[in-house]
Amino acid sequence: MAAPVGDASRQFMDRFSPALIEELCSVYRGQVHYVRDQILHGKVLVMDPSAGSLSSLPAYAYMRKGKVEESGVIEIPQDLLGKRATIDKRLFWIGQSLREKFPEKFDVLAVEYIHHTPMSNTVMPSFQHNIMSHGAIYASIPANHRVDMMPWAWHRNRPFDYIKSDLVDVQLMAKTLLEDAHNALSQKAHRGNP
Amino acid sequence: MLGKDSQAYSQIQGCLLPLMSGVVVAVDPSVGSTSSQPGWAVYIQGELRASGTFSINPELPIWERLRILAYSMRKLYQEWDPDVLVYEDILAQAKGGNRNAGGHASLLKAVGAILSISGPDHCVGLYPISWKRMARTTYVKGDENDAIEIGWIAIEEAKRISEKDPPRSYGEKAKKRPTGPRKARSGADLP
């Protein structure tokens, strides 16, 4: 059963055509299939990107050998979140925090994919800083493989009493990634593929 | 000339001395494609000292190109130890923009990667619409030339501002000009 989500979020998701959703999700499934072994047996970092605001912070889940070992949010000082604070200070803070917290190289880096636009060929202004935070994450976290986590993929795991938060979202993303990697592995075993 | 209320104006005003007498790195962001590569320029005490472009293989996936861009920027910072980074800021596209949205998103990611790196104490972001109208008549479009021009404009603006306006603290906005009361507009006013 569909989980209750905010009207704005639902309205935005409704603007995507089923064909586009299917296309994006098939890219995600292909990526998971390709790195299923690394997801289940290696070091994985799942990131819910954000450029930092009073309502949202970047969140992470660190997985090792198929288990979530740690999850949390990247705290940003209040003076960098105010109206007068500029994006460069926040992105630097995020990059620096990630580099200090995760100096090692990951097998897989999974980041929630932000599609620039549902319909027209334009970047939505509200996504500008979030897309910039993608660049900060990719530049700061070394990894062998990358997975674009589609929102539609992990939304199916939202519980009925789901209340949106950065930490809950990234934990659901990690759970979904593990499930999908297991599914990809069982498909491989079923088909007898090498 | 930048407007006093603009973010770039207050950013420049927050680092007048480093811009005019320190080391300035100017960057024209790009993730590296067949048509564009990131351009850079270095100014010391207002004089152009070096410039060039980073070479990023456009065949690589975008996340690897962003890593290379970040690595190249770190090398540049190590070599020159800049006080100020001047970069071309990217405007969010209004609906109906005629640019490729995927390419635009890549540019935003390139800016995000550049800004996330440890480096100068000050950053100045100039929108294309701002700096292109202040470009010199000798300016010719190109990745390297764009970086050279962006740096030159930030330094020239710093000189102009330092002559006219005393420095303010970083991020502090100029006071809004007082305006008259707005005329109420309701359905009854319409013909």
Image (cartoon, coloured by chain):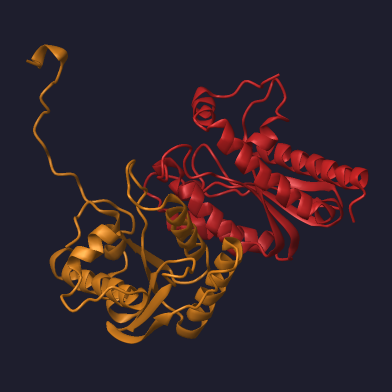
Q: Quadrant of the C terminus of chain A?
A: bottom right
Visible residue check, residue A150:
no
Image-quadrant location for residue A166: top right
Residue A40 appears at what percent x and percent y? Answer: 85, 51
Q: Residue at x 18, y 67 (%)?
A: B134
Name the residue rendered at 23%, 65% in the picture.
B132
- Chain A appears in which tint? red
* For residue A184, above or below residue A168: below
- Judge left or right: residue A114 versus residue A37: left
Which residue occupies the foreground of this view, B105 or B5? B105
**Residue A96, horizontal then vertical, whole percent:** 58, 62
Relative to A190, A176 lies left or right: left
Q: Dividing the image into 4 quarters, which one contains the N terminus of chain A? A: top right
* Residue at far bottom of view: B49
Task: Depth check: give the residue in front, B184 or B136.
Answer: B136
Identify the residue at image location x=61%, y=58%: A97
Q: Could you say where residue A168 lies in the image, as x and y percent from the top left?
A: 68, 35
Which residue is at a point 48% across and 58% down the rendered structure image?
Answer: B106
Question: Is residue A50 at least partly visible in the picture?
Answer: yes
Which chain is orange in the picture?
Answer: B
Residue A35 x/y as whole percent: 78, 55
